[in-house]
Image: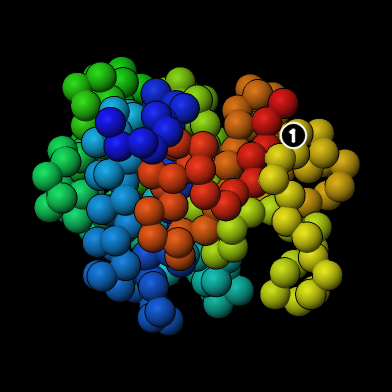
Amino acid sequence: MTGRPEPIYKRVLVKVSGEALMGPDAFGLHQPTVDRIAADIAATHSLGVEVAVVVGGGNIFRGVQVSSQGVDRATGDYMGMLATVMNGLALSAAITRQGTQARVLSALDMPAVCETYTRPRALAHLDRGRVVVFAAGTGNPFFTTDTAAALRAVETGCEALLKATQVDGIYSADPKKDPTATRFDRLTHDDVLHRDLKVMDAAAFALARENALPVIVFSIHEPGSISAVVRGEGRATTVAS
Ligand code: UDP
């Protein structure tokens, strides 16, 4: 007995943005930060929780950046998806170094690099106690890794989508710009829509709402925040129907 609450979820999906992996740097991967996040994922897994992860790519590349520079949007988005594969490989390697088995599953076929995503394969890895890292987003341009996170969470029967962000929850206004902004502990999916709060892009949020998928927003900067959230602890906003 540790005296800490038991996990409240059996299977979760954690969305880690590319920006989170950048740490204090302006670009790319900050290894100590990658290792800290990997350690938290491994600690969450060691609580007996099955963990799937969707990684972003914004620390390396975003499709919209180049669409204004002569590269068409779809090509730029494929470049963005490749960036998420690099992040996925880095995160998976870091999780493995923690002594927890991890597999990268890419929505784009690249067999020399990692396994291709199929739902049965993902479920088999989760059943065998491996952390699965979903890379290449949805595999389609014009989407985001937030949409991939909602999609994979629903597809693989995750009980909650844990969205790691730069702040510790959803606020009534941007807390960096408005000192009167207040943080919500709990909201419904409809509250988010009616108050026009920014949680995820519209496609991602619609998928979560339609499938009554709880979305928990918390800060990636807080060490141990993922394992705290799965125990129902820590500062976070829970969006649930
Ligand atoms: N992307 C895409 N389809 C997807 C997911 C991602 O085209 O299903 C591309 C898109 O160009 C995006 C980039 O990959 O800008 C990186 O993903 P995202 O911006 O969601 O990463 P994050 O903001 O989480 O770091």
Instruction: Report how many numbered discs are placed on residues in the image.
Output: 1
Q: Residue furthest right?
A: 194
Mark 1, residue position? 189
Residue 76 can be seen in this image: no
Element type at marker 1? helix
Q: Is mark 1 within 8 Å of ligand 1?
A: no
* Quadrant of the image containing the C terminus: top right
Q: Position of residue 192 (x, y in %)?
A: 78, 42
Q: Position of residue 195 (x, y in %)?
A: 86, 47
Viewer-nearest residue: 125 or 46 = 46
Q: Amino acid at mark 1?
A: His
Q: Position of residue 237 (x, y in %)?
A: 64, 46
Instruction: Give the colour scheme of this rendering.
Output: rainbow
Classify 10 Å Cα crowding around label 1: few (below 14), some (14-19), many (20 and above).
many
Looking at the image, residue 230 sits to the left or right of residue 169; the answer is left
Q: Which residue occupies 21% across, 49% down?
A: 95
Q: Is 239 situated above or below 38?
A: above
Question: Which of the 4 image quarters holds residue 82?
Answer: bottom left
Residue 71 can be seen in this image: yes
Question: Which of the 4 image quarters holds residue 157?
Answer: top left
Q: Is 219 situated above or below 210?
A: below
Viewer-nearest residue: 179 or 192 = 179
Q: Position of residue 19 (x, y in %)?
A: 46, 66
Q: Which residue occupies 44% across, 37% down?
A: 230
* Quadrant of the image containing the N terminus: top left
Looking at the image, residue 232 sits to the left or right of residue 114; the answer is right
Viewer-nearest residue: 55 or 34 = 34
Question: Which of the 4 image quarters holds residue 6?
Answer: top left
Viewer-nearest residue: 11 or 53 = 11
